[in-house]
């Protein structure tokens, strides 16, 4: 489990992809995740699919500076444009600073 902490930057990316875009999206998403993981300060990435078919991705960076480095990355910007041009029906982005984090795990046995 990644270490989540106060002060980290969490991006919530909600989207609905265009029909027939799965193959192109998968290749692009794999390369973008690898690039994001290479950014110093990358903490975590998780994605989920809602009952309505919308995708929700959570991306966490350790600091605002790490988040800004990813936000401004040239390949990431190009992928965003490709997403608008070819892959998405719609998307929304929310960026927040974590104000607290807790973790619980069931003890063994």
Image (spheres, grey):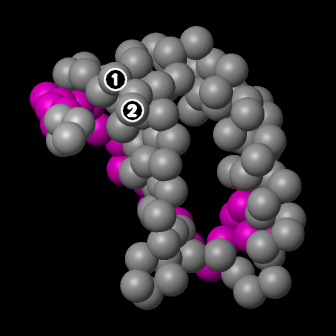
Residue at 20% across, 41% down: 109
Q: Please indicate whether residue 96 sits to the left or right of residue 39 in the image.
A: left
Q: Residues within 10 Å of mark 1 (few under 14, many from 20)?
A: few
The image shows residue 94, relative to residue 25, as above or below, that is above
At mark 1, the secondary structure is loop
Question: Is residue 54 part of the magenta span, yes or no?
Answer: no
The image shows residue 24, relative to residue 16, as above or below, that is above
The image shows residue 28, relative to residue 42, as above or below, that is below
**Is 28 or 46 nearer to us in this picture?**
46
Quarter of the image with the N terminus is top left
Q: Please indicate whether residue 60 sits to the left or right of residue 37 in the image.
A: left
* Residue 52 coordinates in the image, percent (x, y): 43, 87
Give the number of the mark in front: 2 or 1: 2
Callout count: 2
Say the numbered circle drawn on residue 3.
Answer: 1
The residue to which callout 2 is attached is 1
Say the numbered circle drawn on residue 36.
Answer: none
At mark 2, the secondary structure is loop
Q: Residues within 10 Å of mark 2 (few under 14, many from 20)?
A: few
* Residue 18 coordinates in the image, percent (x, y): 70, 81
Judge whether residue 64 can be spotted in this image.
Answer: no
Judge whether residue 93 can be spotted in this image.
Answer: yes
Residue at 85% across, 69% down: 23
Residue at 48% across, 34% down: 44
**Is 107 or 71 nearer to us in this picture?**
107
Q: CA distance from mark 2 to mark 1?
A: 6 Å
Quarter where residue 51 is shown: bottom left
Are the residues flagged by discs 2 and 1 in contact, CB closer than 8 Å?
yes
* Residue 12 coordinates in the image, percent (x, y): 40, 51
**Is 3 or 22 nearer to us in this picture?**
3
User: Where are the magenta residues, as a range?
Assistant: 81-104
């Amino acid at each position: 489990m990644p270490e989540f902490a106060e002060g980290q930057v969490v991006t919530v990316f909600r989207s609905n992809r265009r029909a027939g875009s799965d193959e192109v999206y998968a290749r692009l998403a794999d390369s973008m995740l690898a690039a994001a993981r290479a950014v110093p300060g990358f903490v975590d990435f998780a994605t989920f699919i809602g009952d309505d078919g919308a995708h929700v991705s959570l991306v966490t960076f350790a600091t605002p500076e790490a988040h800004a480095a990813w936000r401004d990355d040239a390949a990431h910007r190009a992928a965003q444009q490709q997403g608008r041009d070819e892959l998405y029906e719609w998307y929304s982005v929310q960026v927040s600073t974590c104000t607290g984090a807790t973790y619980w795990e069931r003890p063994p046995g």
